[in-house]
Amino acid sequence: MADRIAVMSDGELQQLGTAEAIYEHPANLFVADFVGEPPMNLMPCTAVRDNGHLMLRVAPMAIAPSRQLGDLIERRQDRAELVLGVRPVDVELSWSPSTQAVGTGTVSLVENLGDEQIVAVRVGDQSLESVVDASVPARVGDQVWLLMRPERVHVFDSGTGRSLAA
């Protein structure tokens, strides 16, 4: 068994590395969508200033990037052509209001997988998936608050598909 893997698309190498490195730090949108089940949530976003803080706006959500990612975004000329990515395991749900929430949404689907479940949440025009423990009492129609740790958020250039952190 190999300790490194290669992700290819149409005969072109997209990324080479350990399975963990590729999952944690996808080089581009193809790898982000291809590696992991369920795949990474990918949404068009815009970098904006809100009270002096850089935020990634995915209407109606506003997500603070990590300091390192924020620095990379600040160096870009075009901040409108971005794609935000977050793994479903990194989307936490709360059934009560939270000041840490990046937005609210409505549960649109619950898929039980045994010891865990995939919960799809409708947020504005977007649908995000979250992986939660099967004991979480999620029901279609529930209002939930979404939480995302800044260091677990990825940003890609929508034109080239490349990760800003690659």
Image (tube, rainbow, N blue to C red):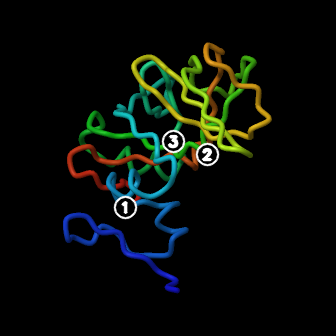
Question: In which image quadrant can residue 31 be found?
Answer: bottom left
Residue that appears at 40% across and 46% down: 155
Q: Residue at x 47, y 61 (%)?
A: 25
Q: Secondary structure at mark 3?
A: loop
Instruction: Tell me the number on the disc at residue 27.
Output: 1
Count of numbered circles on the image: 3
Relative to 160, 135 lies left or right: right
- Identify the residue at image location x=42%, y=27%: 58
Disc 3: CA contacts within 10 A as few (<14), some (14-19) or many (>=20):
many
Which of the two labelled residues, at mark 3 and mark 1, occupies the earlier sequence position?
A: 1
Residue 112 location in percent, x, y? 66, 37
Residue type at mark 1 is Ala
Question: Could you tell which of marks 2 and 3 lies nearer the N-terminus?
Answer: 3
In the rendered image, which residue does mark 2 sit on? 89
Name the element at disc 1: loop
Residue at position x 53%, y 48% in the image = 67
Q: Position of residue 88 (x, y in %)?
A: 56, 42
Left or right of 110, for residue 124: left
Disc 3 marks a residue whose amino acid type is Pro
Question: In this picture, is 65 found above or below 29?
Answer: above
- Quadrant of residue 126 in the image? top left
According to the image, label 3 marks what residue? 65
Q: Residues within 10 Å of mark 1 (few under 14, many from 20)?
A: many
Q: Is residue 133 or residue 144 the one in the foreground?
A: 133
Looking at the picture, tell me which residue is in the foreground, 108 or 40.
108
Q: Secondary structure at mark 2?
A: helix
Contact, mark 2 vs mark 3 (Cβ under 8 Å): no
Q: CA distance from mark 1 to mark 2?
A: 19 Å
Residue 129 x/y as whole percent = 53, 35
Kindly identify the amino acid type of the residue bearing the numbered disc 2.
Val
Residue 152: percent from the left, percent from the top?
57, 48
